[in-house]
Image (cartoon, coloured by chain):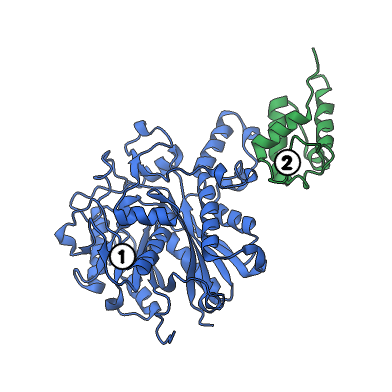
């Protein structure tokens, strides 16, 4: 079975649905290394986003992982790392 | 500095008009916003009419980041606050954060949001509940969101005393103005026309089960049979009179008097507290009863409560001793939003020298009220008394007065 991948497009969609988008942020732009804070997302927005990722992808993200993932790239890596572990 | 608190900005979201001028035009024309509930299917409930705010699309007014974290009542409150600040000609970004406060009232909190998340909790599990449930359904959320959006860090809070809370919040805002806060955003918006909010209101036993919009809410009428609930309300900007004058702000009027009382224990046989609230508010304003031009009634629409209100007014003003009106017959009772909307209506009555009508009501003679019915009544309005009662025994009264009419004021 092919491994499921969590991409920037997936993250952008979930951010849009769960937390909305700041007027100055383009989620379709090259934002993978920007800090979430610069993109207009606070800790609660990330909590909501991670909750949605957990439901949709069937992974568990502990609080430490969420707090450490300060950029989209870090969060993508953390999610994909869990997706690569066979259930 | 006089220490007087004046209203310099108004924002309205009402069932018969979105925005102050739409609302005012509808109110003068006697246009009602009461109809069959559209926000959910009311077929299975004994009461099926409500006053719903028409044509409000939150996404057209608010940034996308605020949409997932807000209940309808908060969206309405944020937009009404924005309109009120613009109306006052105030840009919060140019004022020190601690010079601006927010004091609103709330009756239920964000019930539509809360219902959705509680349904997710019991049907799917805790991990499916929005992180924003942590505040989106709280009583204080409108105050908090207005504060955050406008960078207002001065004294802030929320008052919860059902319909009376809308006046209690204005009074608390006035206290903060007197204590030195430069600007206080106050008033209230409630919007809980969802099944959860509806059953909570049904439990009061005071909802009208009529399905005919112009026969459902008839305060002071022999056919009174309860009230129709509604959503909406108003946000007002309060400032200290001298500060408002210094910046040449347009002043709608002064919050001249206030009092709140609590009813005695049911069955005690003692007189309800409404008359005392009126008398204390008059004393607070330094006015005689004869100086009040119009009363905006609480207008419960329940015969026993209508009688209590009519008795209180007769005791203070004499039978048919003062003009009384209930424009809320066009909106339904808006929980905590009702009294701030009545305050706005009173201030616009002062501005335009027009008293809007009570609609659909044939006043029963036993109440002895000079009720303004059917059409607008014209004539100077310099002072108005607004009454609000909350379930559980709350009585509040606020008196507004035309700007510059303050005793001893030579302006």
Classify B283 as above or below A68.
below
Q: Position of residue B395 (x, y in %)?
A: 37, 64
Residue located 57% across and 69% down the image: B183
> Secondary structure under badge 1?
strand
Residue at image position (78%, 31%) is: A8
- Circle 1 Cα neighbour tier, 10 Å, few/some/many (<14 / 14–19 / ≥20): some
Are the two marked residues, 1 and 2, in contact with CB atoms closer than 8 angstroms?
Answer: no
Q: Are marks 1 and 2 on the same chain?
A: no
Query: Chain in blue?
Result: B
Residue at 61% x, 44% y is B69
Q: Which chain is mark 2 on?
A: A
Q: Secondary structure at mark 2?
A: helix
Q: Chain of mark 1?
A: B
In the depicted structure, whether residue B342 falls above or below residue A79: below
Residue A18, given in percent of the width and then of the height, sits at 65, 37
Q: What residue do we see at 43% from left, 60% from top?
A: B340
Q: Which residue is mark 2?
A: A46
Name the spot of residue B378 as percent of width and height, x first: 26, 66
Rendered colour, chain A: green
Q: Is residue B121 left or right of residue B50?
A: right
> Which numbered dot is residue B354?
1
In this rendering, position of residue B350 left or right of residue B68: left
- On the question of residue B262 being in view, the answer is no
Within the image, what quadrant is residue B211 found in?
A: top left
Number of numbered discs: 2
């Amino acid at each position: 079975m092919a491994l499921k991948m969590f991409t920037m497009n997936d993250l952008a969609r979930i951010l849009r649905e769960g937390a909305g988008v700041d007027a100055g942020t383009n989620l379709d732009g090259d934002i993978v290394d920007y800090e979430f804070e610069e993109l207009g997302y606070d800790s609660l927005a990330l909590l909501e986003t991670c909750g949605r990722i957990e439901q949709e992808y069937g992974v568990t993200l502990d609080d430490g992982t969420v707090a450490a993932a300060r950029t989209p790239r870090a969060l993508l890596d953390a999610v994909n790392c869990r997706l690569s572990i066979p259930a | 500095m006089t220490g007087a608190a004046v209203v310099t900005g108004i924002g309205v979201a009402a069932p018969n008009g979105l925005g102050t001028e739409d609302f005012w035009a509808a109110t003068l024309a006697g246009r009602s916003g009461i109809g069959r509930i559209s926000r959910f299917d009311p077929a299975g409930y004994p009461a099926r009419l409500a006053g719903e705010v028409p044509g409000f699309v939150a996404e057209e007014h608010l940034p996308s980041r605020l949409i997932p974290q807000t209940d309808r009542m908060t969206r309405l409150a944020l937009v009404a606050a924005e309109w009120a600040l613009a109306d006052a000609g105030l840009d919060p970004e140019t004022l020190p954060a601690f010079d601006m406060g927010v004091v609103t009232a709330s009756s239920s909190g964000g019930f539509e949001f809360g219902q959705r998340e509680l349904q997710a909790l019991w049907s799917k599990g805790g991990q499916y509940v929005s992180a924003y449930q942590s505040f989106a359904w709280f009583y204080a959320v409108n105050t908090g969101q207005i504060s955050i959006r406008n960078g207002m860090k001065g004294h802030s809070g929320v008052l919860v005393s059902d319909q009376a809370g809308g006046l209690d919040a204005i009074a608390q805002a006035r206290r903060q103005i007197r204590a030195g806060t430069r600007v206080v955003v106050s008033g209230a918006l409630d919007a809980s026309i969802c099944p959860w909010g509806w059953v909570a209101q049904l439990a009061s036993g005071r909802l009208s089960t009529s399905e005919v919009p112009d026969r459902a809410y008839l305060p002071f009428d022999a056919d009174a049979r309860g009230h129709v609930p509604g959503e909406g309300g108003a946000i007002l900007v309060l400032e200290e009179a001298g500060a408002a004058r210094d910046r040449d702000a347009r002043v709608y009027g002064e919050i001249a008097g206030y009092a709140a009382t609590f009813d005695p224990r049911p069955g005690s046989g003692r007189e309800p507290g409404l008359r005392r609230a009126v008398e204390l508010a008059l004393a607070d304003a330094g006015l005689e009863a004869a100086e009040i031009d119009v009363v905006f009634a609480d207008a419960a629409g329940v015969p026993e409560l209508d009688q209590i209100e009519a008795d209180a007014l007769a005791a203070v003003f004499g039978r048919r001793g003062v003009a009384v009106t209930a424009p809320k017959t066009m909106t339904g009772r808006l929980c905590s939003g009702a009294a701030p909307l009545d305050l706005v209506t009173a201030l616009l009555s002062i501005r335009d020298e027009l008293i809007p009508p009570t609609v659909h009501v044939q006043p029963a003679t036993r109440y002895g009220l000079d009720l303004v019915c059917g059409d607008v009544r014209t004539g100077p309005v310099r002072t108005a008394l607004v009454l609000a009662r909350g379930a559980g025994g709350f009585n509040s009264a606020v008196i507004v007065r035309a700007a510059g009419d303050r005793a001893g004021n030579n302006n």
